[in-house]
Amino acid sequence: MADKKNKRNNNRNNMDDDFNPKFRKVRKKVCPLCADKNLELDYKNAEQLKKFINDKGKILPRRATGACAKHQRAITLAVKRARHIAILPYAQD
């Protein structure tokens, strides 16, 4: 019985040494609009807004864009305005 306990404890200690990709440390993304103070978000600039939409035309979430909450709201508003005046499509085929 004592051998089983020692074996279990040894396995736990060995797990700490192994690399486990499930628990890797992920670097936090930096907001692209906060990082570059000269970058101005504009609904008329389609090339800039295409970075924040996917291939189907959907607005990317914060976890994908790395934008802060303030700038994500501004991105959403700019994309919606650009769609309304037909600079960006509502959906891609």
Image (spheres, rainbow, N blue to C red):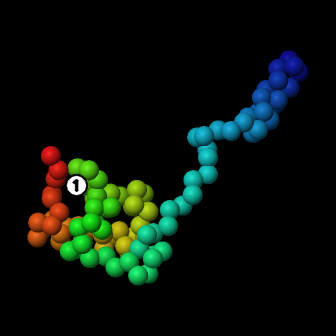
Q: Quadrant of the N terminus?
A: top right
Viewer-nearest residue: 93 or 24: 93
The quadrant where residue 13 appears: top right
The quadrant where residue 11 appears: top right
Residue 31 shown left or right of residue 47 in the figure: right
**Pointer 1: residues within 10 angstroms few (<14), some, or many (20+)?**
some
Whether residue 5 appears in this view of the structure is no
Whether residue 93 appears in this view of the structure is yes
Q: Residue 25, how many percent across, how many down?
A: 61, 51
The quadrant where residue 45 appears: bottom left
Q: Is residue 63 above or below residue 44?
A: above
Q: Residue 33, how many percent across, how many down?
A: 41, 74
Q: Amino acid at mark 1?
A: Gly
The residue under the point 61% across, 46% down is: 24
Label 1 sits on a secondary structure element that is: loop
Q: Is residue 79 above or below residue 19?
A: below
Viewer-nearest residue: 88 or 70: 88
The residue beneath circle 1 is 57
The residue under the point 11% across, 70% down is: 85
